[in-house]
Amino acid sequence: MAEDKRDYYEVLGISRSASEDEIKKAYRKLAKQYHPDVNPGDKTAEMKFKEVSEAYGILSDPQKRQMYDNYGHAGVDPSYGAGGPGGFGGGFDGFDLGSIFEGVFGGAFGGQQRRNAPQKGETLRYGLDLTFEEAAFGCEKEVTVMRAEDCGDCGGSGAQKGTSAETCDLCRGSGQVKTTQRTPFGVFSSASPCHKCRGTGKIIKTPCSKCGGSGRVRKTRQIRVAVPAGIDDGQSISLRGEGGFGKNGGPKGDILVTMSIRPHPIFTRDGSDVIVEIPITFIQAALGDELIVPTIDGKIKYTVPEGTQTGTVFRIKNKGIPNINGHGRGDQFVKVNIETPKNLTASQKEALRQFAGELQSTNHQSQKGFFDKMRDLFK
């Protein structure tokens, strides 16, 4: 009886002022939770699923929702007859759950496709190992892939050469059968894969001996990959249409190739910039010198000014990695580190002491500034 039914808004867990979008979201969540495919054999979940489906069927229809808001269950329950409040006599006879799922989930529950519908081929994923220079300037490589292709003997039909697949007489080629069930809530219709043809819509009486009736064989192929200049570690290239063959006339899949760049013994990379660290002597730093600097294009000469401090970074424009979009290049940054000499002889040490004695505070501005601050701090 209508009096025993829960309030539809309570069933969906929404307020009476809920919008259409809120109603749909609430139903989507509960339908996934209680769907029979998710809860096989659970009668309680099955009843809850029917309850939320009934609530959604009313509240998603503006006219039925208005009748329900005005008269409650009596306004939408066919047990009250065609002469009920407002003369409503719609009810749930012939109610098709498939139509609800198509509107809410965009097709079959959980996004499943009919097996006889066109399906895109498998997307394959591979890794490619590159040197620092190959990534910087681009290269061509080959990857060995294993992919599903149409069987050459049967042409992908799955039937032995000289024979053909027959249309399933149970589902008449649709791959689905429709069942109708009468429940206390009305008559519900649903579609499920045909058990006779397993959802393919076709019966293969004489399967192909090479592919076993699947219509597919796995083959090894060498695929050339054009690696663009400037690609970075972890970035991927998509090779459209080079993946597995599609089914039922569907397009081929893709190949996704992800790059792994080996570390360089000298250079490190920061986006499109290259960084290199070079050790220099105290004399080179104090007096300045012309250094031989390695770059990814080869060696160049670069002059460091006198008085260079350790950790100083110099910028050499346009000596970095080419931008992957083809516009310009990054820069190279050269960091110099002053190497303190070790294992000095007695005469070398004495020479350094004499040199240090001749230096004045003006020759060490940073040190003077530090000790001035420290003296002020501890006054």
Image (cartoon, rainbow, N blue to C red):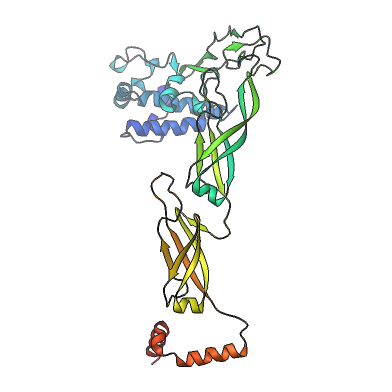
Residue 331 placement: quadrant:
bottom left
Q: Check the image and report above or below for 343 versus 191.
A: below
The image shows residue 366 at horizontal and vertical percentages of 40, 82
Give the mark count. 0
Of residue 315 and residue 15, the one placed in the foreground of this image is: 315
Of residue 339 and residue 296, the one placed in the foreground of this image is: 296
Residue 74 placement: quadrant:
top left
On screen, residue 202 versus residue 190, left or right, reads: right
On screen, residue 73 versus residue 179, left or right, reads: left
Q: Check the image and report above or below for 337 versus 118.
A: below
Q: Check the image and report above or below for 338 versus 326.
A: below
**Does residue 232 appear in this view?**
no
The image shows residue 85 at horizontal and vertical percentages of 30, 18
On screen, residue 342 versus residue 180, left or right, reads: right
In the picture as drawn, the residue positioned furthest to the right comes out as 209
- Image quadrant in which the N terminus is located: top left
Query: What residue sits 32% from the left and 15% below the top?
Result: 88
The image shows residue 306 at horizontal and vertical percentages of 42, 76
- Image quadrant in which the C terminus is located: bottom left
Of residue 108 and residue 142, the one placed in the foreground of this image is: 142
The image shows residue 178 at horizontal and vertical percentages of 52, 13
Query: What residue sits 34% from the left and 36% below the top?
Result: 15
**Does residue 278 appear in this view?**
yes
